[in-house]
Image: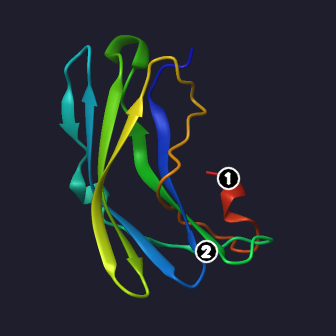
Amino acid sequence: SHDGPFLWRIEANGDDGYHRTLTVHRIRVSTKITGREEWYPEKLLGKTVEFYPVKGDPGESFAQYQIPGKLEVYPAEDGPITILVDLTVQSVENSERELVRFRMAPQQTRDFEFLFLPADIVTSRKDDPRAWKW
């Protein structure tokens, strides 16, 4: 079954030397059918992750933010799911805080990707960060 709970992360592409860090401040999960609206515990968030150069892709950088724990949603039961993420991306020029909305439809599988923003604490910085195991 492709039902939850799921491991989850936020990924971001950036410009090497320009984008520095990503911080996730808050996350809200809303479900359509079951009507749940829950904030993820803030004490588990707030960690800052770095953008790393992408090997073999000059000028590109990449960050992964591994959300601790599992996303407690069950698409078959909950129906469409909306995730609202309050995050900050720090560059060499400024810091930009935004609310980013992701929508998940019940027919999506475990292999869905969030293609906007950042990071995972990793031990190896030699490989392409997009291929890191999590």
Where is mark 1, residue-wise? 133
Question: Which residue lies at the image location 48% right of the left edge and 60% below the top edge?
Answer: 118
Residue 125: image tag: none
Task: Give the spatial CA distance, label 1 vs label 2.
Answer: 15 Å
The location of residue 65, given as percent across then percent down, is 47, 59
Query: Residue 74 versus residue 44: which sits nearer the camera?
Result: 74
Q: Nearer the viewer, residue 11 or 116?
A: 116
Instruction: Residue at the far right: name it.
Output: 56
For the image shown, how many numbered marks are present on the structure?
A: 2
| 59 relative position to 77: left or right | right
- The type of residue carrying mark 1 is Lys
Q: Which residue is mark 2?
A: 52
Residue at (41, 44) in percent of width and height? 69
Question: What's the residue at 57%, 85% (across, down)?
Answer: 17
Q: Residue 102 at what x, y percent from top left?
A: 38, 40
Disc 2 is placed on an element classified as: strand
The answer to whether the residues at label 1 and label 2 have Cβ atoms under 8 Å apart is no
Position of 94 with respect to 51 (left or right) is left
Res 58 seen here: yes
Q: Assess disc 1: are there few (<14), some (14-19) or many (≥20) residues with their C-alpha within 10 Å of its C-alpha.
A: few
User: In the image, 7: left or right of 45?
Assistant: right
- Does 6 appear above or below 47? above
SS label for mark 1? loop
**Mark 2 crowd level (few <14, some 14–19, many ≥20, 10 Å Cα):** many
Q: Position of residue 78 (x, y in %)?
A: 32, 17
Residue 27 image offset from top left, x and y in percent: 28, 48
Q: Quadrant of the N terminus?
A: top right
Using the image, determine if residue 44 lies above or below residue 28.
below
Place residue 47 in its image quadrant.
Answer: bottom left
Give the colour scheme of this rendering.
rainbow
Q: Amino acid at mark 2?
A: Tyr
Sequence order check: which comes first, mark 1 or mark 2? 2
